[in-house]
Amino acid sequence: MIKAMFLAGLGGAIGTCLRYLTGRLCNLFVVGGFPLATFVVNVVGSLFIGLLFGFGERHHAFSHAASALLITGFCGGFTTFSSFANDIYMLMQGRHWPMLIFYALLSLVLGVGMVCLGRWLMKG
């Protein structure tokens, strides 16, 4: 259990650093207040988790340690549901209803779509 906890922490640290860098890069392209950084990491993170679970299902060789490192740690550190929820709140506060609906629906549809795509790609 201690080993898995440290692996999850390591994966989380790597995911968090990559999320930070992705945010910095996305901030170069933000137009009109759309929360691009949160959107990108959530969609890409959804693809990652789909690929990881799909790989594990396909090869029947996804250890508890690998799951702790990659899924719990990396994907958990990389994706940002709490930031997503805050972005929704901020859009509500600013009464940006069309952007709020667009962002929430697009995030949900693409997030689930990317999980499906990742799993499909790994089925081979």
Image (cartoon, rainbow, N blue to C red):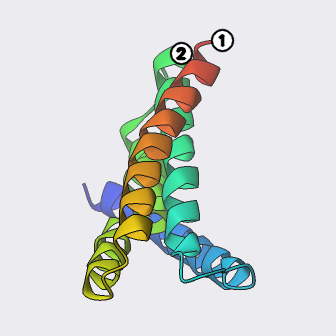
How many labels were placed on the picture? Answer: 2
Label 1's element? loop
- Labels 1 & 2 near each other (Cβ < 8 A): yes
**Residue 3 position (above or below residue 30):** above
Closer to the camera, 83 or 18? 83
Q: Is residue 47 left or right of residue 104?
A: right
Q: Is residue 111 left or right of residue 91?
A: right
Disc 1: CA contacts within 10 A as few (<14), some (14-19) or many (>=20): few
Closer to the camera, 7 or 40? 40
Q: Which is in the foreground here, disc 1 or disc 2? A: 1
Horizontal and vertical percent position of residue 1: 24, 54
Q: Which mark is residue 33?
A: none
Horizontal and vertical percent position of residue 123: 58, 14
The residue indicated by pointer 1 is: 124
Query: What residue lies at 53% left-to-right and 75% top-to-bottom?
Result: 34
Horizontal and vertical percent position of residue 117: 57, 28
Q: Residue furthest top?
A: 124
CA distance separating discs 1 and 2:
8 Å
Closer to the camera, 110 or 92? 92
Amino acid at the residue labelled 2: Arg
Query: What residue lies at 63% left-to-right and 22% top-to-bottom?
Result: 121
**Residue 50 position (above or below residue 102):** above
Label 2's element? helix
Tell me if I can see residue 66 in this picture: no
Tell me if I can see residue 100 in this picture: yes
The residue indicated by pointer 2 is: 58
Query: What residue lies at 61% left-to-right and 79% top-to-bottom?
Result: 23
Amino acid at the residue labelled 1: Gly
Horizontal and vertical percent position of residue 113: 49, 34
Closer to the camera, 10 or 98? 98
